[in-house]
Amino acid sequence: MFIKKKAKSNISKFQKGLLDRLRNDDEHIVAVADKGLGPVWVETPRYIKDALVHLSNPETYQIISEAQGFRDSWALKWKIFEWTIEHRKALSKQEVAFIRKKLEKAMDEPFGYFYLLYKLHKTPISTRPVCSDCGSLPHALGQWVDEQLQPIVQAQETYIKDSFSFKSEISKLELPPNASIFTYDAISMYTNINTDDCIKRITEFLKNPASKKRFVHYNTSALVEALILVMKNNRMRFGDLLVKQLMGIAMGMSPAPTIANLFVAIHEAAAILRFVGIFLLWLKRFIDDGFGIWLHDPDPTVDDANWETFNATINSGGLKWTFSPRGKKVVFLDMIVEIVGNKLETALYHKPQALHLYLPPNSCHAPGVLYGLICGMTLRIHSLCSRAQDVEAELVSLFRCLVDRGHQASGLIPLFAKAIANAKTYLAQDPAFRARKKQEKLESSRRRVFLHLPYHPQNPSSREIQVLWRGLVSDPALKTPLNWIENYNGNRIPIDQLVIAYSRPPNLSNMFSYRKICKLSGPKVSSYL
């Protein structure tokens, strides 16, 4: 990463502000000198102690020896390999080849990496445990499980894809006079899911004849066995410690959100949805965040009893949830949702701690990053704000934040004008047309090749690279274009386009959330036990 001198100073000041929030005493944060790559932060007693708070819970994690970890890994490798043999009729040749190739590649380092994400918006600051399992032994099988479960999860009654689909759905609703809205949130969803209970619930659902009739794409035996292998074999490194997860699902694993989503959805279908039409008008959930529209009973005593019944039924599904008060306004998916008349209107919600510190103009990023930021934020603002005055206020606020970061207003104005025009054009399109265009882009993306490069302003520009690509590869003068050349099977090479993919420089998450803490200087993690 190359950062111009002024940008490095700006970033260091921001990092210092966050570190001041994290610091309890002088020994908690240790910074080493700049090595030409910006500030480098080594492991700290605070970070390790915060991590060990999670890892020392004997109900959730077990510290194991290296020898035990590698013995278990060899056993797991052969279990997965045997699974590909036993269920070869339910798998495509590509799936078998992919899983086996990843198994061989993962044996050199078969474990995931445990790290923390600091919730800086919380007071006091708390942490979220995460497992980076890319490259671990069960990762490829977890990806297969995720692909198999995704269609099932997306078909559940309470499923919402994202804030945009949520906004689209609630815009169609008409509310009666006795309606209120509320939210509910799971407490540490991933680590609090009982593994055996989760496997049992999902297995029973998959084996149910009604499920088999509704979803015909999966092989029950193959999917259940893969689910068990993935959920019961998460092992992670943290420094010189090797840890096995005993309960729950590790956030960061491929199928974790999908499994957690289905675990809750099955309970909702069996016990919660029967309330819809009685004292619930509408209920949706985004993984561990739920939103509902409540219908008040004229009798306050009956209404309170209904609310208690609903709360208790939600909490009887294997997780504990917190509920907001029922009212006319709530915050959900970073939006303010409010009842206005008989409709629901939305505006963007900004956490009080949000500093809006966008990239400064002298930070060394590809030129398209700024327009991409403006274009994405502008579309988000137009999509999620119901009122024109809120759209205008948010755009003005974004513009001022970028000016405050050092960008020139004269350079921003044409970018904003283009982004606003694009957002309005996109939102005016018919949803079916947008879906068709998206599918066309997906098809064309399969005929692209990506060149991954770290960005540097002194390197040839992407425009120059594209000129070379067209002149030498895709459409050379007096020579056969690449996509007309046949491979050894007699098929034309399916590559039409080169995409320059610039990698981003390290950010604060990389500095605070160490994946491979063992590579940093300082005492071993085990010395803090």
Image: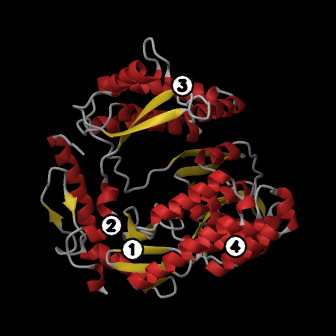
Residue 93 or 345: which is nearer the viewer?
A: 93
Q: Tag 3: residue type?
A: Ile
Residue bearing mark 3? 485
Could you tell me residue 298's position as x and y percent? 80, 65
Q: Tag 1: residue type?
A: Arg
Could you tell me residue 456's position as x and y percent? 25, 36
Residue 519, visible in the rendered structure:
yes
Q: Which numbered disc, 4 or 1, marks the residue closer to the eye?
A: 1
Q: CA distance from mark 4 to mark 3?
A: 60 Å
Q: Is residue 267 left or right of residue 372?
A: right
Q: Residue at x 84, y 57 (%)?
A: 214
**Helix, strand, or loop for circle 4?**
helix
Q: Is residue 7 left or right of residue 351?
A: left
Seen in the picture, residue 460 relative to 238 is either above or below; the reply is above
Seen in the picture, residue 216 relative to 347 is either above or below; the reply is below
Q: Which numbered disc, 1 or 3, marks the residue closer to the eye?
A: 3
Q: Are the residues tagged 4 and 1 within 8 Å (C-beta)?
A: no
Q: Are the residues tagged 2 and 1 within 8 Å (C-beta)?
A: yes
Q: Are the residues tagged 1 and 3 within 8 Å (C-beta)?
A: no
Q: CA distance from mark 1 to mark 3?
A: 46 Å
Q: Residue at x 35, y 47 (%)?
A: 356
Q: Which numbered disc, 4 or 3, marks the residue closer to the eye?
A: 3
